[in-house]
């Protein structure tokens, strides 16, 4: 995991099928307080407030533009911050925004907020960490793919 001042690049753990696998996804973001993103699924200790552990599927498939897809979004239980996730296409169009997830909460399936035509789309899932006043204190992005079948 490479860390520079207010910028992060690293890997992300994702769920595929029945097992947990780590994929070499690029993650980046401008972060005010968060200086490290964990990809270790076995970390149980509470993380310092400068670190964040997240999880999302790298590939989310939908039967059609209005069906649900398996995303497995998690705010890992050892995080300090609640967070919400927004998914944006390459052109910046937001196609999904989650509710606020407290540490330990997850969303298994999502429905897109914008109907997409059949195809495969590159997107970025932004994890927005929130302080006690619901202000964003850090953001990390993970490159994902969205596939709409018909």
Image (tube, helix red, strand yellow):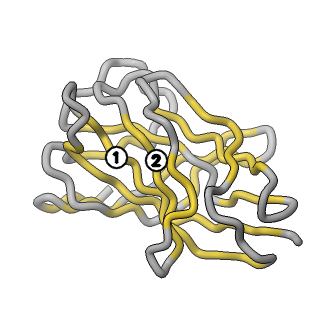
- Left or right of residue 144: residue 36: left
Q: Is disc 2 in contact with disc 1, using a CB cutoff of under 8 Å?
A: yes
Q: Residues within 10 Å of mark 1 (few under 14, many from 20)?
A: many
Q: Residue at x 33, y 63 (%)?
A: 28
Q: Is residue 116 above or below residue 80?
A: below
Q: Secondary structure at mark 2?
A: strand
- Decide if residue 139 is on the left or right side of residue 77: left
In depth, the one of 49 and 123 nearer the eye is 123
Answer left or right for 134 relative to 12. left
Going from the N terminus, do you reach mark 2 or mark 1 first? Answer: 2
Label 1: which secondary element: strand
> Residue 148 or 142: which is nearer the viewer?
148
Q: Is residue 21 above or below residue 28?
A: above
Q: Position of residue 18 (x, y in %)?
A: 80, 38
Which quadrant of the rendered structure holds the N terminus?
A: bottom left
Quadrant of the frame with the C terminus: bottom right
**Separation of residues labelled 2 and 1 (CA atoms):** 6 Å
Which residue is disc 1 drawn over?
128
State the image coordinates of residue 137 (x, y, percent, origin top left).
19, 43
Q: Which residue is mark 2?
A: 85
């Amino acid at each position: 995991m490479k860390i520079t001042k207010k910028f992060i690049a690293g890997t992300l753990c994702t769920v595929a099928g029945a097992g947990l696998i780590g994929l070499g996804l690029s993650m980046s973001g401008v972060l005010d307080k968060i200086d490290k993103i964990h990809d270790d699924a076995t970390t149980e200790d509470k993380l310092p407030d400068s670190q964040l552990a997240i999880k999302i599927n790298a590939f989310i498939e939908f039967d059609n533009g209005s069906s649900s897809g398996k995303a497995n979004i998690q705010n890992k239980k050892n995080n300090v911050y609640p967070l919400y996730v927004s998914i944006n296409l390459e052109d910046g169009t937001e196609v999904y925004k989650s509710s606020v997830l407290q540490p330990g909460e997850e969303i298994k399936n999502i429905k897109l907020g914008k109907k997409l035509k059949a195809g495969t789309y590159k997107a970025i899932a932004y994890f927005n960490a929130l302080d006690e006043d619901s202000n964003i204190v850090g953001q990390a992005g993970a490159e994902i793919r969205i596939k709409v079948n018909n």
